[in-house]
Amino acid sequence: MLKARLKANQAFQTVWRYYRRCQLHRSYRKRREYYTLLATERGIVYREAEVIASIRSRIQARGYIPTQRRMGEVHTFACIPQFSWHKHLLPDLNELGKVSLFDYVSLGFKPKEFYGNPKWDQMRISRREQMVKQMFSAFREAHLKHPVDWVLCYGGGQDISATVIRRITEEFGVPTVNMTFDDKHGWTGPNTGEHCTGARDITSVFDLFITSARVTCEWHMVEGGRPIYMPEGFDNSYYRPRDVNKDIPVSFVGVAYGFRKSVIRYLRKYGIPVQTFGEGWPTGHVEDIVDIFNRSIINLGMGGIGYSESLTNVKGRDFDIPGTGGGVYLTSFNPDLAQHFIVGEEILCYRNRDEMLELIRYYLAHPEEAREIAHRGRERCLREHRWLHRYQRALEILGVFQ
């Protein structure tokens, strides 16, 4: 009862958001400065070409020579649990060739066993140990049937075992890659019994570690990793244009957490007819988000992390929405994101709420301009930002593709 009253009290919520924002900023800055100091002391500077050379030397040093493959010939062992949006990682993997998928969800393990609750009791640790044992057995079986060209994982220390990855490289030599897309916020967490959740404790065991935050590359290097900055991609088999009426002026798709509700209240205060979709909003979970992206004149993005609007990170939506090619994508300015699109021509960005409001008003009054920008955004995504492009780049680095 009290919790419900506090949630409904706007004054309390404003104070709570401010407290959580300050807490987040303090934690992030402390971690950032810690790694900056260590990197400076050790002379560590992220240079992509040097990291690539280090990756190739590491693979060569264990006596493994990658077999060069063509498109359609690659055998991928993928450790990608199938929940949330993760299914969108698979279609482009299948274009590369055979995929042997290790999906712990299909084996009876539930994501909530490894996510969410910060307390890792003995039962959860035991369940995780069972899961990672099955991971190694699945790899060995797949490799014996048909040689695996690379191991691709998506997850943190809760999903992946450093011991298993180390055993794969030592016994079979096969190159290993992991991807994490929330390193600024989810760098490390509770202890799983083997190591902590997040990326910190597992980065050093992978040959290549893909991160979507440029600033965290040196964090990985300090911890012994070989990171390559690479953002998310998009699944062209799912995110694509549809011939539908543009009956939603402005939409926002995403969970209603952190600062997001206050942004929506701000827009509605100034008369913007924004519609919200996702958990925590009155509409609840929506199955067909591609329909919403196509029906919207403007698809609103919020690039902030947690309770912070100013601490931004590249997100999957930054490619899903432009890749759909429906309504124009308007999101927070992020210098990393600006490396991948021409802002103002392929996507739109704002630096504060006033700019957000003004851009929305302008493009609602000029829907044809919005449509042209959305079209150019999709063309860029098709050329450069499919998941296939990310996988091809990783395979080139490993030496599987020329």
Image: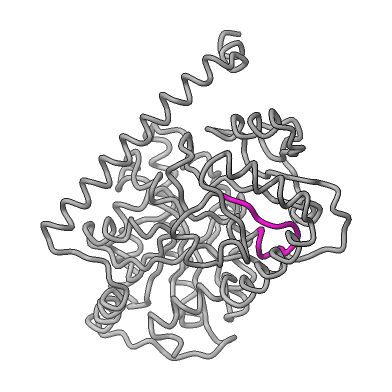
Image side of residue 179 versus residue 34, left or right? right
Question: Where in the figure is residue 365, as x and y percent of width and height?
Answer: 78, 50
Residue at x-position 77% and y-position 37%: 273
In the rendered view, tell whether residue 159 sits above or below residue 15.
below
The quadrant where residue 186 appears? top left
Identify which residue, 328 or 261, lies in the foreground. 328
Question: Where in the figure is residue 74, as x and y percent of width and height?
Answer: 52, 83
Question: Where in the figure is residue 156, as x and y percent of width and height?
Answer: 41, 52
**Model colouring:** one colour
In the rendered view, tell whether residue 61 sits above or below residue 283.
below
Q: Residue 327: say if magenta.
A: yes
Residue at x-position 76% and y-position 49%: 364
Image side of residue 89 versus residue 396, left or right? right
Identify which residue, 307 or 55, lies in the foreground. 307
Task: Name the image quarter holding the C terminus.
Answer: bottom left
Identify which residue, 371 or 213, lies in the foreground. 371
In the rendered view, tell whether residue 255 sits above or below residue 396.
above
The quadrant where residue 371 appears? bottom right
Residue at x-position 33% and y-position 88%: 65
Residue that extends furthest to the left in the rendered view of this protein: 41
Q: Residue 359: say if magenta.
A: no
The range drawn in magenta is 321-331
Image side of residue 264 versus residue 391, left or right? right
Residue at x-position 73% and y-position 39%: 274
